[in-house]
Amino acid sequence: EPEVTQTPSHQVTQMGQEVILRCVPISNHLYFYWYRQILGQKVEFLVSFYNNEISEKSEIFDDQFSVERPDGSNFTLKIRSTKLEDSAMYFCASRREIEALHEQYFGPGTRLTVT
Amino acid sequence: GQNIDQPTEMTATEGAIVQINCTYQTSGFNGLFWYQQHAGEAPTFLSYNVLDGLEEKGRFSSFLSRSKGYSYLLLKELQMKDSASYLCAVRHSGNTPLVFGKGTRLSVIA
């Protein structure tokens, strides 16, 4: 069964450093998302991406964040200058079509630890 | 604004039935989802409701009342592996992202 994959599974970085989190969505999916989950808290939406552009973003997704689909398969989240409070699990998700029937499939997540 | 409420924790016995409630207030509504999340893992899809009523899928069922802004997830014949967090999430229009509740941590005991 096709699945969303993410790399790395765990990333440790120092405050102020740039990180790139990578995702490979399911191949025939058209909508891509990044969510984050701080330890013990709820899953929070960051950004959605469709047709090679951002379709929606949350207040969390400030100028430090950017997303890119550099080729036909990868979908990346970049944090330019990490802060301690960026430590969280970052989940990529993808969805096939716009109809509500189609649920989002989540990747296994990248645990980001900022020290 | 958007608000999704569910109990923080529940405990139930192996073999029993448990009902996890979710209430929501959102600016629009285009579907309610239930996800299961084991500790340290990704959410996995369980069910979807957009019309009022009960959707049954094996041991899991989900109910929706749009007029009451209320849903529940019913788990039957509980197994130890059902110990996880159960996340209620709402989509308020066609292509918008999911808004998640804080999740209900279910512990299944022998």
Image: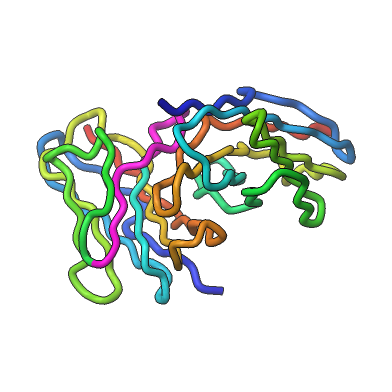
Place residue B24 in its image quadrant: top right
Q: Quarter holding the C terminus of chain B?
A: top right
Q: Quarter holding the N terminus of chain B?
A: top left
Place residue B82 in its image quadrant: top right
Q: Residue A2: x and y, percent?
A: 51, 73
* Residue at the image point whose x is 42% and y is 31% from the top: A39
Q: Residue A53: x and y, percent?
A: 21, 60
In the depicted structure, whether residue B75 falls above or below residue A9: above
Which of the pair B102/A98 is nearer the observer?
A98
* Residue at the image point whose x is 79% and y is 42% from the top: B75
Most extreme residue toward the front, as rendered?
A: B67
* Residue at the image point whose x is 57% and y is 32% from the top: B103
Place residue B108 in its image quadrant: top right
Q: Is residue A38 on the magenta stretch? A: yes
* B39 to the left or right of A58: right
Which color mode does the image show? rainbow
For the image shown, how many numbered marks are present on the structure? 0
* Residue at the image point whose x is 25% and y is 34% from the top: A60
* B78 to the left or right of A72: right
Q: Tell me where the magenta segment starts and ends, as one range.
A: A36-51
Q: Residue A38: x and y, percent?
A: 38, 32
Residue B22: in sight, yes or no?
A: no
Which of the pair B11/A55 is nearer the observer?
A55
Q: Is residue A28 on the magenta stretch? A: no
* B24 to the left or right of A68: right
In the depicted structure, whether residue B17 falls above or below residue A31: above
Q: Residue A44: x and y, percent?
A: 39, 37
Residue A97: in sight, yes or no?
A: yes
